[in-house]
Amino acid sequence: MAAKKKKASTRRRGKRKTTTKKPRIWWRVLLGLVVFGALVIGGYSVYLSKTVRVKFDGKRWAEPAQIFARPLDLYVGASVSPAQLKAELQFLGYRAVSKVSGPAQWSQKGNRFTIHTRDFHFWDGDEQGRTIVVDTSRAGITRMRGQGSDNLDLVRLEPALVGSIYPAHNEDRVLVKRSDLPDHLIWGLLAVEDRRFYDHAGVDLRGIARAMIANIRAGRTVQGGSTLTQQLVKNFILTSERSLWRKFNEALMALIVDARYDKDEILEAYANEIFLGQEGDRAIHGFGLGAHFYFNRPLRELRLHETALLVGLVRGASYYNPRKHPQRALERRNLVITQILEQGFIDQATADAARKQPLGVTKRGSANDYRVPAFVDLVRRQLRRDYREEDLTSEGLRIFTTLDPWVQQQAVKALRKRLAQIEKARGIEAGSLQGALVVSSAQDGEIQALVGDRDAGYSGFNRALDAVRPIGSLVKPAVYLTALSQPSRYTLSSLIDDQPVDITLRGGQRWQPKNYDRQVYGEVPLHEALARSLNLATVNLGLEMGLPPIISTLHALGVNRDIPPYPSLLLGSVSLSPLEVTQVYQTIAAGGFRSPLKSIRAVLDARQQPLQRYPLTVSQAADPAAVFLLTRNLVEVTEAGTAAALPRYLSGGLQVAGKTGTTNDLRDSWFAGFSADRVAVAWVGRDDNASTGLTGASGALPVWADLMANIDNASLQLVLPPGVEYHWVDQYGRLAAETCEGAVAFPYISGSEPTETAECVEQRGLGGFLQNLFQ
């Protein structure tokens, strides 16, 4: 019995011994796992912390280059009509109000404008915003004064932001600082996205619980538990992958971010990173760009209902897109306003007033290259000569260009409306015609407008730069300039042969050009041959001089590409783009002095320091005396030649010079011309190179005329250069008197005037007078 008790006692002791050992083993294992887990999490946290530090402490974003139009100078006498001034202010995103009370506002009473300008940092210094009163008339500005009664000499309106050059991943943004964020934007973010932002440490457990309860009650996801910090981590560092591992990383990194950076830094980063929309393949990031994209104005100028819309887009930029889904966006915006009210940031009256406001978004993205894509394309190509691509897409350069928004607007309108009218009037398939327009200043070659598509907002094929098409009769001024540069052989009144031409080309092919009307006119004065664009006369003249000097003239005028020395060159077989043609005619308009066409005036870096200026460069390309004779002849083209219809389009007796151009089978319609201060080139054609049925006079000329009639232009003044003088001649090119029947005054390079005297002069006893005059 005792033995049994001893054995039982032993078993009980053995049991007790066994049960005490197991917990100690598991405790050690558990402790080891905890320590190991802590080390792993700690090490992983160090790794994540480094990732966060690298991302936040370095250059956070590739800041796109910003492209600005030219500023508008306001002064008494400036040719700025009321319509233009209103359009310029709208283009800048200034707000029309009944009473001006702050920056970027304007009001109008009749022809008087009250404007409060913005502060702006130009390439040559700062311009402070101020209130000005501008009196205007159809002719321009008549008076300008400050807020008091002091007259002002000059005020410069800041240039409009017209485009960006953004990185390869197509993210665009306008960086803002925390101080740029309006209070009502912050209120909206806190009310809708993260009510306890200033209280939590990056992750809000209470917010997560609240969201879970709300979602359970609704039976669907109606609230999110992510803080602003978590959203920033997801968008800025992580991906949108849906997984528990990503959520774990997001939470851990949010804690790290909140520990390392203050709340204002987090808000600033969030404001610049958040996705707010898509335009084509370009992503709109940040409230800074969002303000321009949806409202065409800086973020600091937005009102409560406008920032509420931007905040509403955070939840789903595509779903709440105000341009595609305005009602949905309006409801979302009003919900944001309501939540701002519920959080006590605003009172009931303010909320009611904000909810009554329309969405107020612009029709399409404003602060981007879709406003003037063809011009931005030109700017980008010219910048590549001086900067690396990565500098253009990441260093925040500010590029000040030559674009004139008013001229651009009129060019867009002229091309779009006139092409539609031509199609309707001639029974051409609607939308089948295409076109391009280029406008430059006559003297310095600054590109003021450039349109590469009848839909100017389309950023596809840029016809102004890349539609390299035969230029037809636009080449003829180069042929005649070559002749007039030889005054001992040719003058405006020289007779040239308009006779059939039959040339056997290499390979046995015969070339037999014809005049447009299939007629032959025999001997004709040189000026008439150009005015009437006679093909046979031009070919005979060109063959008489030889092709090499004509090719040299084209190169001197600004053609950079190789030109094959074929006889067909004389009738425009050479192919050029509208921009290249503009260079040729700009050199003629400037009196034979070539200024390379340019679209850029200055470049500043992100710190507002000048990097490069683009000064005016001029070189003499042709004899000014010969160019004057040619210009006189091109005026004749517009008054009595192939462009004789032009004066009925233009008002006020505007004198211009120009040339029509038509290619084989009526495929290309061209017109190039200039006033005293502007050069413009218009092209009309089809992308499939099929016939348009249009000559230069019936297609491109009306487009050109519509443009020039609606912008300010100075009439050509044919001021004689040194070494040129006028003489009266008759129809046969003989010296005559003003009183002789049919006598016309032509300019001649001194010593090249006719020596033969007209019969009417001798009959009227003027022979001795002329003899004495020319001795």
Image (cartoon, rainbow, N blue to C red):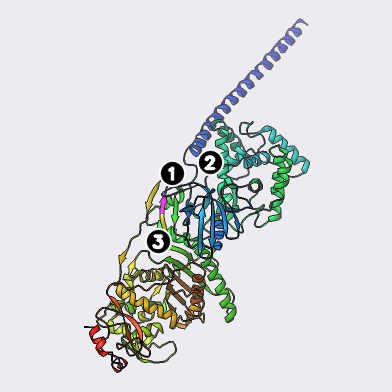
Does residue 732 belong to the magenta stretch?
Answer: no
Q: Position of residue 135 (x, y in %)?
A: 54, 58
Q: Is residue 566 left or right of residue 330?
A: left
Q: Residue at x 21, y 83 (%)?
A: 775
Q: Is residue 40 left or right of residue 554?
A: right
Residue range (magenta): 602-607
The amino acid pointed to by label 3 is: Lys
**Label 1 to label 2: alpha-carbon separation:** 14 Å
Residue placed under numbered mark 3 in the picture = 598
Vertical position of residue 68 compared to residue 524: above or below: above
Q: Residue at x 63, y 39 (%)?
A: 244
User: In terms of depth relative to the viewer, which is nearer, 124 or 57?
Assistant: 124
Residue placed under numbered mark 2 in the picture = 177
Query: Is label 2 in a helix, a strand or a loop?
Result: loop
Residue placed under numbered mark 1 in the picture = 607
**Label 1 to label 3: alpha-carbon separation:** 25 Å
Q: Is residue 679 left or right of residue 356?
A: left
Q: Position of residue 223 (x, y in %)?
A: 71, 42
The amino acid pointed to by label 1 is: Arg
Query: Is label 1 in a helix, a strand or a loop?
Result: loop
